[in-house]
Image (cartoon, rainbow, N blue to C red):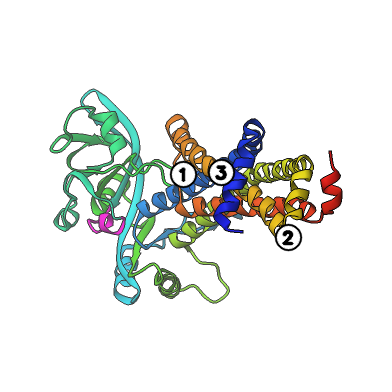
Amino acid sequence: MDILAIIRIAMRALARNKMRSSLTMLGIIIGVGAVIAMVSVGQGAQAQAQQQIAAMGSNMLFVQSGTVTRGGMRMGWGATKTLVYDDVLAIKREAPSVKDAAPGAAASAQVVYGNDNWATNVNGTEPQYFDVRTWPFEEGNPFTQDDVTMAANVAVIGETVRKNLFGPVDPIGETVRINNLPFKVVGLLQGKGTSAAMGQDQDDIIFVPITTLQKKITGQPWLRWIVVSAVSQQASYTAQEQISSLLRDRHRIRRGQDDDFFVRNLADVADLADQNARLFTILVASIASISLIVGGIGVMNIMLVSVTERTREIGIRMAIGATEHDVQQQFLIEAVVLSLLGGAIGIVVGIASSFLITRTLGWSVLVSPISIIAAVIFSMGVGIFFGFYPAQKAAQLDPIEALRYE
């Protein structure tokens, strides 16, 4: 029999019991809609995490001063004083996989502008830091290498500092006081938001030349950290090994001794975030798939009822020449059509639910074409799997007994 004719017969059979068919499709609709919505939430979370990590910098490595033991007590990260400016020069000079590097030191300070004040972090660094971090400017410009050489009192501020100190006032050219020292604001950075790796507000910060911080604020000549940009993401692991080997040699660390520094590769953080987000997506999709399986059981149930109700019809069709294959094909296609109709409506429900989640909860969602295609294939598979047994049962009916059925 022509496949189109079979589909038309299937549609007429389903249309004879609209309410029953609609209720049967409801399970498929809910299942497909839930899978698409949950997968979209999971993929949205994955994309957002990757964006946050990418916002921290391009192919970036973070070298931090390490731990030290004093009086039997093991101090935390940043306690050593062995990381110095010459290490930055050595990394740029002797590590082939390194594109650029910038030194860093930090201090907490109360910053004052007019009648307002704000407690924030003051970081000392060099102009290339903003290139390593791929951190664009909203207004103004970074301080220059001449400012670093002369230990000038200039500052670049983050968006959080701007909001809390300046409000609607344009900060460029204004003067703030840090530890009672006047600093001219020369640049305003674009907002980056919360760091996915560190969990802190990246915009609550002020940058000044490294020499200014060391000579006029902290009085400490050593560094707290060095940010490094590798030539590529693939080369970041090679750069990590090169930096570790170089610093161990420069700091005269013998074999078997612990490092007095720590090198963190953001590629590892990105991979971990990607694995966690993928696991979350699989978990929520698996939970949502349970409703799709329940919907498939509903399809099997309604098809078994349909076989019982249409036993005499099956006998008549067999009597006029229909084969077992024709009967089986007829009921199998009815189950597939039922599942596909439910799946099509479920796709619309799932996409609408994804946008509703975004509007109401503010979550990031990503509706992937792959998830839609997978939903269509899965709903078709549900129709075939759960429709096979009723179709086989219909095909195995004895024609004579079927004609006698009342």
Would you name the residue on which mark 3 appears?
A: 341
Give the residue type that dot 2 points to: Thr
Q: Secondary structure at mark 1?
A: loop
Badge 1 or badge 2: first in the primary sequence: 1
In the image, taking residue 330 as reference, residue 50 lies left or right, namely left
Residue 7 point in image, percent of width and height:
58, 50
Query: Does the rendering let one see residue 253?
Result: yes
Q: Is residue 85 above or below residue 10?
A: below
Q: Is residue 118 above or below residue 86?
A: above
Q: Which mark is residue 323?
A: 2
Give the residue type that dot 1 points to: Gly
The CA distance from mark 1 to mark 2 is 67 Å
In the image, taking residue 88 as reference, residue 237 lies left or right, namely right
Chain part drawn in magenta: 125-133
Residue 137 point in image, percent of width and height:
21, 47
Look at discs 1 and 2 and give the one toward the viewer.
Answer: 2
Asked if the magenta segment contains residue 402, the reply would be no
Density class for disc 2 (Cα within 10 Å; few <14, some 14-19, many ≥20) is few
Look at discs 1 and 3 and give the one toward the viewer.
Answer: 3
Give the residue type that dot 3 points to: Leu
Front-lying residue, 384 or 136: 384
Would you name the residue on which mark 1 appears?
A: 199
